Image (tube, rainbow, N blue to C red):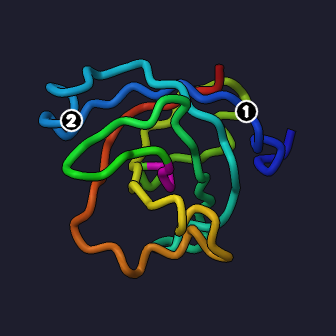
Amino acid sequence: MATKNLIGSDIELIVSDPWEFCSVHGTGPFLAKVTKVGRDSQIPTKEAIQIRFSTPLPYKGMLCEYFITSPRLESGDLGDLVYDREVFCSLTAISADRANSPDPFDLSWWRGGIGLIGTMRRR
């Protein structure tokens, strides 16, 4: 299965950082669905996915529903999800407007918004 075939897949996410998020919502597992596959705007050779939380969570004045997710480690690969392996990842919260924009993977605007670190796997 190609990485693009992850669209529509259910994802389970365990959040490990930031502590403040975990103290409010716990570490999970949080359920989400892959909505888009694209390129990491910071490392264009790496793929990224857009996920949508099944239950949006309020945090720091924002309703966290959509995230752009990319492998956290240089050696990480979203293709591992295809083979039901866990991926250590970074998640950047984006608004619904950005999620539905022509290029939701462009994070050049992001300067210290909501970011999470965790581990995800396909359910």
Name which quarter of the figure residue 82 lies in. top right
Label 1 amino acid? Answer: Ser
Q: Residue at x 59, y 57 (%)?
A: 48
x, y percent for residue 117: 32, 42
Q: Earlier in the sequence, mark 1 or mark 2?
A: 1
Please say whether residue 79 is one of the residues in the magenta stretch: no
Q: Which residue is mark 1?
A: 9
Helix, strand or loop at mark 2: helix
| For residue 80, above or below residue 42 | above
> Observer-nearest residue: 29 or 73?
29
* Front position in the image: 47 or 30: 30
Give the image location of residue 21, x and y in percent.
21, 35
Residue in view at x 44 percent, y 60 percent: 94
Q: What is the C-alpha distance between the residues marked 1 and 2?
A: 25 Å
Residue 60 in the image: x percent, y percent? 19, 49
Residue at (33% x, 30% y) in the render: 15
Q: Is residue 23 visible?
A: yes
Q: Position of residue 19 (x, y in %)?
A: 14, 34
- Magenta: main secondary structure equals strand
Residue 25 or residue 58, whichever sits in front:
58
Q: Which mark is residue 21?
A: 2
Residues drawn in magenta: 66-71
Q: Residues within 10 Å of mark 1 (few under 14, many from 20)?
A: some
